[in-house]
Image (tube, rainbow, N blue to C red):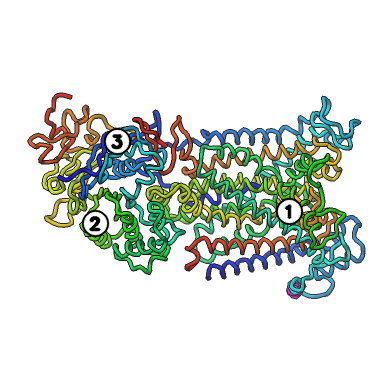
Amino acid sequence: MSDPVLEIRNLDVNYGLGDEAVHAVRDVSLTLHRGEVLGLAGESGSGKSTLAYGMLRLLPPPGVITGGQVLYHPRDGEPLDLMTLSTANLRRFRWSEISIVFQGAMNSLNPVHTIAAQLCDVIAAHEPRTSRAAQRARAKDLLKLVGINADRLNSYPHQLSGGMRQRVMIAMALALEPRVVVMDEPTTALDVVMQRQILAQLVELRERIGFSVLFITHDLSLLVEFSDRIAIMYGGRIVESAPAQDLYRESLHPYSDGLLHSFPALRGPRRELTGIPGSPPDLRAMPSGCAFHPRCPKAFEPCADRSPVLAAPPGTSSATDNRTVACWLHAVERVNT
Amino acid sequence: MGYLLRRIGFYAFTAWAAITINFFLPRLIPGDPVQALIARSRGQLDANAIQSLYILFGLDTDTGIVEQYFDYIGQLFRGDLGLSFTFFPTPVSEVLSDSLPWTLGLVGITTVISFLLGTFMGVLAGWWRGSWADMLMPVTTFLSSIPYFWLGLIAITLLADAGGAFPSSGGYDPGVVPSWDMDFVWSAVYHSLLPAITILISSMSGWVLSMRNMMLTVSSEDYITVAHAKGLSERRVMIGYAARNALLPNVSGFALSLGLIVGGTLLVEIVFSYPGVGFQLFQAVGAKDYPLVQGIFLIITLSVLVANLFADLIYLLLDPRTRKEG
Amino acid sequence: MALPTAEVMTAVPPAAPTPTRKRRRPRFLGNRKARIGMVLFGFFVLLAIFGPMLAPYDPGERGDQLLASPNGDHWFGTTHLGQDLFSQMLDGSRSVMLVGLIAGVVATVLGVLIGVTSGYLSGLGSESLSALSNVFLVIPALPLILIITLSLPDTNDMTIALVIGCTSWAWGARVLRAQTLSLRRRDYVEAARATGESTWRIIGFEILPNLTAVIAASFIGTVIFAVLSEITLAFIGVPGVSEWNWGAILFWAQSQQALAQGAWWWFVPPGLAIALLGTGLALLNFGIDEYVNPRLRSSAGTKVRGVKMRVGFTPVLSGKGDST
């Protein structure tokens, strides 16, 4: 396994302060390695987007980060903790090291500026010495990279189709050649054909440019297909993390299993679609013990009382198998804690 | 350009509606409108004035109402708005052409300044919440609830009377002759300062408030988060992304509320005895000078429509979405 | 005059709460602005009901103290005829409130009828109603009210309230049309239509209840406008307005040169009373705005318990890290 680029350690994110605070992300640790595609899946409300925005400190009010570290490992030098960066440093850091492709392609672009202006302003902000002509040339290359004709440069967002806009966003994310690109459901607003096209393009770009991707989606089967590793979130916690193929072959957590049976697989043998009964937990009133137990088909005695710990399941070693799960079915010591 | 044509069509329609209202209002009253006006003016009208009323209303000849209507429109196009009672036998159009420049200068310029300044302060107040800007809100609310003309009275008491720094009435010094020389221009500017400040203070707060609210609304749009994620400078995000988008509804709000604002600002002229249309309106109401009131209504409506058209042009420049296909 | 800011706001549909961000809707009166506004408004309503009875003098009665400054006998001073200004203010409050409220009701009813209809219907009828509201919006309101009142053979408080009401419904209609248009596309309305519910039932039971806040805001906005308009009319000397309407008091103050004589007590109280009433109504409206548009009450940028909330830079509470 290659070196880590981004390490999230025990991150806690709340909405609101004091007694009214809602714990949206609890004690999440996650590592993104160089060149890797890490998938993050879960139903809506599981905290996956909150985690992504929280680690970049982009959460709108009333979001607050209440604990943990987000360590970024630069090409050389000491790791930086994003949580302690000053505003100015954070501004410099953003996009040049980690960029994001947001959920809503429709609203991610500023409607009153041309595509060119929006591609150039980010270059100008981070590399102030670039001439205007050079900025435009870069913008043109970026559009070409995602398969958009250069004559679109002077278009306004409303003149582009949804798929094109999302591609512009991807081009923009790559503008400063960041080492990490976060993708928050980048294709959900698009039709299936467009989804496939854009994802294929993304895979190709990643191979060419070599950045790491944190890919967030509720569609687990999509992740199985093209991510290296997958982490599953439920109720603000990571409940399982495993290499994509392992998870697909043998998911350990009943929730992962449920997710796998909620979407048709894109390739391979057909699976029976069963879905998950019930609805995601209310973050303001989380169930006791394992948050999933009220919906879990395999719940038994300890589940309602005690929260399972995320750990390597019995019979595996965290060094070689690289998988963890938080479930009493796979706990090493069931009786203690 | 389809957008612009549609707007021009709408304004033409509105102008026609205003003219039609003007034509039919006195005719809707049962009985002879001239007699009704005579009764209300309690014998202040002389025979000439009565005759001019009959001519204005088209009652001097025995024609049908349709013909009267077209005659009326024809008269308007020739700039004939009837004769004023107050300044008998001066035509209304002449009275208005004397006063309109004063009003355009005072009300027109201050309204634009007020919008620009208020919008700018609204940008700051919306972006830096919890700072001095929020402390401003109660004051702003209070100021926007005051009738403009009353604030004018207070301004005169505090700043003009009793050896104050500003003249309390008139559009220029009685000593200077109206012409385009330095003396006169300076005198006119000096006299317009206090009314202008009055209008500014009371009308600006509305813009501060609406722009602040628009900034708050726009701040939670995705593209603002993207701009932050891009690591753009604070100024770029505030001006180029948030304010630039928040401005759009504020400009269309400006166009729409001009009609409301102008009514209020005009009356500031009354307390300052400013030689504009508003002061004339006051005199005309006092003298029951119906033709003059009608003429003022028309001229203000037309001015507001033209101002609206300008606002539309600016909107067109600001919003690429209307530029394309409308 | 106060701009009805609600118009611009409601052009944007209320933000859908993000899934993880469920917040309790604060009850309307939990809002401090709304509470203060309610108290001010209530005070003036009580004044309108009981004020004329409480007046110590007959407001028109002439006294010996001419143009006296406020004193023990005359709390607000007297006019050039020795009339008691305090009594005039109390007496005038009824006319001010009555005209304002009646005009507000008339305009709101018209606004709801025209706005909701043009928002719900489609096609030519809808377009022409919308054009009609725009015409009424663009035509300068005050001069229009003036020429109408001047052409009426007989004017009193009631007719003036009606004229103001019939000319100032356009703001409300515009806002309501925009809201209705967005409501019409909501699923539950589509569903009701699909099941063949009658149009009037859908409007009455599915749409109107969701417009309550907007209707209230437009009512309050119109009352503010109506109060300012009638006071202005009285101030310019339009006949028929109640004798001691605050605008009429200002008219007399102006025409008797109260300013030049230094009689500040003559014109300060009416103006302050109007401003307080207007502030109260405006505060009520802010309360409604913040209730309707959650973005306005977001804590963005404000300091909550020492933590500065800021869009784009999420605060970090733990560790040695400083949030800004």
Secondary structure mostly seen in magenta is helix
- Compared across the picture, whether B254 is left or right of B75 comes to left
Q: Image quarter for residue A285?
A: top left
Q: Which residue is mark 2?
A: A209
Local SS, label 3 = strand
Q: Indicate the position of residue A35 as horizontal and vertical percent values.
A: 21, 50
Task: Report which residue position mark 1 lands on.
Answer: B266
Amino acid type at image mark 2: Ile
Q: Position of residue A301 (x, y in %)?
A: 16, 28
The vertical placement of A301 against C195, above or below, is above
Q: Residues within 10 Å of mark 3 (few under 14, many from 20)?
A: many
Q: Residue A122, percent across and down?
A: 39, 54
Query: CA separation, marks 3 and 2?
Result: 28 Å
Report the magenta residues as a range. B65-71
Instruction: Give the residue displayed 79% in from the left and 48% down from the top.
Output: B271
**Chain hosting mark 3:** A
Q: Amino acid at mark 3?
A: Gln
Q: Which of marks 2 and 3 precedes in the sequence?
A: 3
Q: Are marks 1 and 2 in contact (CB under 8 Å)?
A: no
**Res C58 visible:** yes
Give the residue at mark 3.
A69
Magenta stretch contains residue C59 = no
Residue C59: quarter of image: top right
Task: Report the side of C189 relative to A189 (left or right).
Answer: right
Amino acid type at mark 1: Leu
Asked if labels 3 and 2 share a chain, the reply is: yes
Dot 1 alpha-carbon crowd within 10 angstroms: few under 14, some 14 to 19, many 20 or more:
many
Number of numbered markers:
3
> Which residue, as the protein is rendered here, is positioned at the far left?
A315
Confirm whether residue A217 shows in the render. Answer: no
